[in-house]
Amino acid sequence: MKIMRALMVTAAVLTVACGGGTPAGNATAPQASKELQINGAGATFPYPIYSKWFSEYNTLHPEVRINYQSIGSGGGIRQLTNQTVFFGATDGPMSEEQLKAAPGPVLHFPTVLGAVVPIYNVPGIEGDLRFSGAVLADIYLGKIKKWNDPALAKLNAGVKLPATDITVVHRSDGSGTTFIFVDFLSKVSPAFKEKVGVATSVNWPVGVGGKGNEGVAGLVTQTPGSIGYVELIYAKQTKTAYGAVQNAAGEFVKASVEAVTAAAAEAAANMPADFRVSITNAPGKTAYPIASFTWMLLFENPTDKAQSAAMVNFLKWALTDGQKGATELGYAPLPASVISLEQAALAKVKVS
Amino acid sequence: MRARSQDLGFRLTTGAFAAALAAIVIGVGVALVSQSWLTIQKFGLGFWSTSTWDPVAGDFGALPFIWGTLYSSILALLIATPIALGIAVFISELCPARLRTPLVFLTELLAAIPSIVYGLWGIFVLVPAVRSLQTHVPDALRALPIFAGPPLGVGMLSAALILAIMVVPFTSSVAREVLKSVPVTQREGAYALGATRFEAIRAAMYFARTGIVGAVMLGFGRALGETMAVTMVIGNNPQVSASLFAPQYTMAAVIANEFTEAADALYLNALVEIGLVLFAITLVVNGLSRLLIWSMARGARGPRRKPAGAAA
């Protein structure tokens, strides 16, 4: 008897549960048709500007809602390849291997620019220090061990550098910031390229790792004699002093929004059709050498054409009106030459 | 008839939950193995014993991370266990009743603080303190491998200290509960034989020893898996070093640090295999502590008279 009743109760509960599911499903369906949801995932570096863009774009076009998860460039590429998101975002362009692993051709679209700056804590030094790529590479290889090393002294004539040991600080977490920094060092130092190479995480010969920009900055502020690298935005927001870096033309340039855009403008002259280009160590007198694009990734022929059309419209907006919001958040806007190349390239994305 | 069928239903339901537990453990193991198959095939057992971690070249070895995890956890255990047991004994045996509730509340509060908060505290308070300690270490001691290295503040000692602080409330809470469950007759018996208070407490601790070992192992398990606070203070440098002051790395920390940006398959597999190694080490540690507790419990049946004799 009791079993029967128990069974009936269970059955009733199940019916209610299933029944409950159907109306709920119906309730969300009309909403979904009214509002187009687009999901993306990837780099953390552009997250502040992307979230601002997506929310502004949603105010302008309430029918399009773009969700973005800042899970890291690697995660973005993985999710795009597995087609669990509609678009990806990355701080380092996809490799040939990764492109081959994707189920269809993937297009890169630069959205904004970022830069990496050297920060330091040298007892007794107030003003800006000057670095060259070769010196930075030797410091991060552990070859230059003291602040008064002749190579550093030569760049900073007139500055009294102490005989303090250099403590090297790098990122411990995989990061686009690291990618940009080691990409630059590998370009200017063959020894660095051979020993360390370019990736979001590398095998550092010396130093300690801090987690995130704040971890690196924290270690540098606390440790006398240390040097580290952080994103330009982070240094600006926290008002951390940073050094000038010698560019390919031999000029010492302090990173600024203008100097980063200048680096990209130089690169635009030789821009490859797929936009997968490194702009570290860019030519030009005013170009800042440790800079990079950050990219959005789209399939050339996405299955969902409605989302595809909406995303192309969004990118058109981001490349024009959207760029105006970049500077105030500390990102460098794209140079006009790159924008016009991208507007032409957007036509490649199939929207019907 | 009715009662029995109800019984059966109850048994089946709870049995299903218990089976789910086993299924989860096995499922985690299987998933870890299948997701790290590339590196298991490529590096084999060498993964456990080599020290290169080079994502660019695709060369991976877990030894520095295994070393860092075990070193920091064991060190933390050595620091935390005496303190935690002291707290437990004081609260359960010696503490004036008015102090007991606030003390219990405080230990529970310590256990509830999120690890990232410990990490922040570590960066701003502990690391500078350890750095100034390092600068005061005499040069003669500096020459020893255990104190070698420049005064960075971040490193093994900071990690072990922060782990110890995080482990203390766990171990002391469980040890306190275990001591509370020791029958009053044990203590009364000890007093009746003329034991001092210290001797009576020692008898109670001997009675509760399996539970106390369990409490210590619980703390060890927590130290092995702790991620955020450790990665913020350990310096994140994969090297096998005996020095307390050297920056090192743990398994949980490297997974948390590098997983989000790892894009190529071999690299991802290597990170998952680190997870597998951590899983295996945790299983072994738990298994060993089980064995220890069993052997102690079995030993207790034989020379039962020992504590009484000690107390006499």
Image (cartoon, coloured by chain):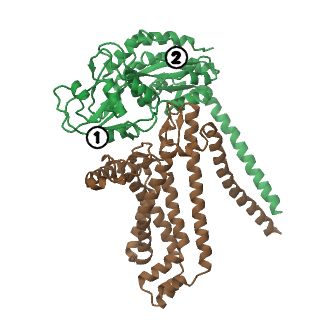
**Location of residue B81 in the rendering, given as x and y in whole percent from the top left corner:** 44, 65
Q: Which chain is brown?
A: B
Q: Residues within 10 Å of mark 2 (few under 14, many from 20)?
A: few
Q: Residues within 10 Å of mark 1 (few under 14, many from 20)?
A: some
Earlier-in-chain disc, 1 versus 2? 1
**Location of residue A102 in the rendering, given as x and y in whole percent from the top left corner:** 61, 24
Evaluate if marks 1 and 2 touch, with contact meaning CB atoms under 8 Å apart: no
* Residue annotated with mark 2: A313
**Location of residue A110 in the rendering, given as x and y in whole percent from the top left corner:** 46, 19
Q: Is residue A52 left or right of residue B127?
A: right
**Location of residue A150 in the rendering, given as x and y in whole percent from the top left corner:** 23, 29
**Which quadrant of the figure contains the N terminus of chain B?**
bottom right
Circle 1: element type: helix
- Identify the amino acid type marked 1: Thr
Q: Is residue A157 left or right of residue B34?
A: left
Q: Residue at x 61, y 30 (%)?
A: A84
Q: Which chain is green?
A: A
| Disc 2: host chain | A
* Residue annotated with mark 1: A221
Circle 2: element type: helix
